[in-house]
Amino acid sequence: MLKRLLTPLIVGTALLAGAQAATVGQAAPDFTLKDVSGKTVRLSDFRGRHVVLEWNNPGCPFVRKHYDSGNMQTLQKEAAAKNVVWLAINSTEASHGDYLNPAQLGRWMSEQKAAPTATLMDEDGAAGRAYAARVTPHMYIVDPQGKLIYAGGIDSIPSGRAEDIRTATNYVRQGLGEALAGKPVSQSTTRPYGCTIKYR
């Protein structure tokens, strides 16, 4: 089962291999998206604060691993307590079976007791492609100057098993902790894992 789930990851990597990836150490691409309530949100609105970007698709078993266990919500709340912005972004195109419209996605996030700063719709995939986001969840950290300081997986064990969360190194928690302490992120690029993003 896990092998079948991971197969699209390989395909997704190949499909986007030619994309101009956002580069750690360089300026994070700005974007303007609507949240699930229709409000316009720009990444640049949060200059001066650390920002976590989480690519999200509730139809993905790997996303559900981190939400059903409460792991993602815990990270979101820890970030909020430290004045860190958390933007959950869904780049699923509208004709795919995994697509949820804004109201549906907002309801799912509410049911999960998720706590991002905003949940954003990226149906045309422009933001996802700007970051070369390949899978859900694909995670990024942007520093207060707008520089990308982390890109990769949520943690070090690329499995669909929730029991692996407690023994994995959580790269987002580790990277944020280092960045907030004024230290360089020790593992600034890691291998993302999950379901291939369903781009248009």
Image: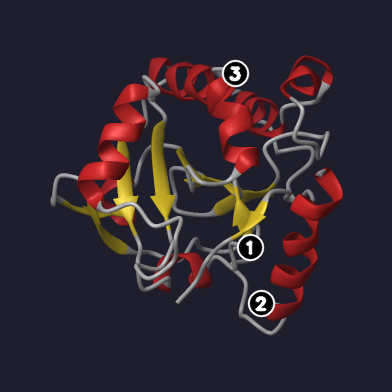
**How many residues crowd mark 2 within 10 Å: few (<14), some (14–19), many (20+)?**
some
Distance from Cα at disc 3 to Cα at disc 2:
30 Å
The label number, if any, that marks residue 134 in the structure image: 1
Rendered residue at 45%/53% (across/down): 146
Check the image and report above or below for 133 versus 109: below
Report the mark closest to the observer, 3 or 2. Answer: 3
- Residue type at mark 1? Arg
- Residue type at mark 3? Ser
Q: Measuring from the top left, give residue 31's x and y in whole percent.
A: 34, 64
The label number, if any, that marks residue 20 in the structure image: none
Rendered residue at 80%/66% (across/down): 10
**Residue under pointer 3:** 69
Distance from Cα at disc 2 to Cα at disc 1:
7 Å
Check the image and report above or below for 132 versus 24: below
Q: Which of the pair 170/100 is nearer the observer?
A: 100
Q: Earlier in the sequence, mark 2 or mark 1?
A: 2
Quick check: 108 left or right of 167? Answer: left
**Residue under pointer 2:** 16
Asked whether the residues under the numbered discs 2 and 1 touch, taking CB atoms below 8 Å apart as contact, a structural biologist would say yes
